[in-house]
Amino acid sequence: MDMFDKLNQAKAAFQNSYNIVRGYELARDYYANLGIDVDQVIAKVDSVPISMHCWQGDDVIGFEKKAGALSGGIQTTGNYPGKARNAEELRADIEKSLEYIPGAVKINLHANYLEADHFVDRNEIEPEHFKNWADWAVDKGFGLDFNDTYFSHPLAEHGTLSAADPDVRKFWIEHGIRTRLIGDYFAKRTGKTCVINHWTPDGDKEFPVDTLSPRLRMADSYDQIFEATKDVRNVMDGIESKLFGIGVESYTVGSHEFCMGYVMSRKSDHIIMTLDAGHYHPTEVVSAKLSSVYTFADHCLLHVSRPVRWDSDHVVAFDDETRSIMEELVRMDRLDNTYIATDFFDASINRQVAWIVGIRNVRKAIMAALLQPVAAMKAAEAAGDVSARIAMVQEYKACGMLNLVWNYYCALKEKGVGLDWLAGIKDYENKVLSLRK
Ligand code: RNT
Ligand code: ZN
């Protein structure tokens, strides 16, 4: 490259940055007219922690020495090369992805991502098996969240916390207990609350004759887990419901009603509902449930995901439902009460692209919700002006100024404006991922 080319390149780079700032200034003035301080919005958006699920990086397999196939009615499809084969690779992949993900993150681990030189069964897991993760998180300043793993295990074939076999149920209760102790360890190590999500795949392919007993057993199992670990502090416990899983289509023990009933009846300050965007009937949406949850609860945990016709766990899109969820949280003033976690696993594309696109979309949806004149919209509604209401809701939802603020925010954080991150990921794919056989 000669001097002339270099100068031209510098000019183009300058022009780009200049345009980003110009865009920001335009948007800043536009939003100021609506009574919105863009700089405050940016600071807020940046501070909302999103819990990044580790399991997108290796198709939910984990690092147990006897790791088998994924089970429990969930599925990854696709065979894109380069998935992480061990915890070091996974951590490196997460770090690389985070170069292009702006804003506060926590890392969300599953119990099967332990590290040990021998096989450690689920009822034997200890904090020491997660020491490397904790050391890494402390070093990087990340919070850690956690999940028990009640699937991909031979003893999970006929139920876990609801199992009729007392020994099997005992095994899984022990797993739940140890999961909470590890959550306690994470909270102590990182100094940040550890949010644990409890999800069991228990269910039946056919509609059972006795639908009550498994539910009574599951409630009792959770009670036992919480009673045995009642001294654990700084841990929140989400109970995740589901409509159905593959192979257990007719009956799910941990249904929405079961989980909501369990959480509400325990009146605990740490047992909360988990709402996964893919866990309801196809026309039933999480955004429509949140204000009912918040009528009776102070917190909840979200699994932001994208169901395509079923709980397919596609990469989160910047779609209406993701936006509606965040709009609800903002309009209810419950953004800070809500633990936001991602949950998807696409094995058909570069796994880092999956993380980056999905998590950026979650944060962008938060920004989109905050860049709306909520007070004015509420005032129109309260005054009974339903015509102004629809006009305002539609106008501000689609406002094109959003991207100008988003681009400026990404530039400010040096996380890649527009698609400026894609080449970096392709490069990593060529240099690192493609060498993994
Ligand atoms: C399954 C649930 C659950 C899992 C993770 C891996 O349908 O959504 O949250 O995706 O535990
Ligand atoms: Zn989930």
Image (cartoon, rainbow, N blue to C red):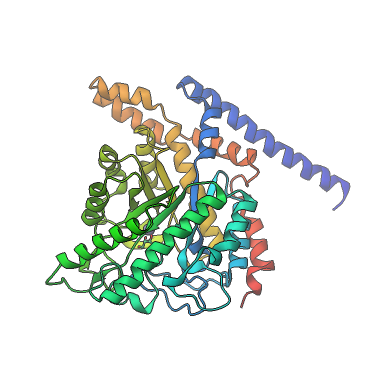
Q: Residue at x 33, y 62 (%)?
A: 311
| Quadrant in the picture for residue 217 | bottom left
Above or below 193: residue 67: below
Q: Residue at x 25, y 76 (%)?
A: 165
Above or below 263: residue 337: above
Numbered disc total? 0
| Quadrant in the picture for residue 46 | top right
Residue 270, percent from left and from top: 36, 47
- The answer to whether residue 237 shows anywhere in this view is yes
Most distant residue in the left direction: 209
- The answer to whether residue 143 shows anywhere in this view is no
Above or below 234: residue 78: below
Instruction: From the viewer's side, name the closer residue of 241 and 410.
Output: 241
Residue 380, percent from left and from top: 29, 22
Residue 296, percent from left and from top: 26, 40
Judge left or right: residue 422 versus residue 375: right
Instruction: From the viewer's side, name the closer residue of 121 and 199.
Output: 121
Judge left or right: residue 177 versus residue 169: right
Q: Residue at x 49, y 41 (%)?
A: 48
| Quadrant in the picture for residue 353 | bottom right
Residue 88, percent from left and from top: 62, 66
Quadrant where the C terminus is found in the figure: bottom right
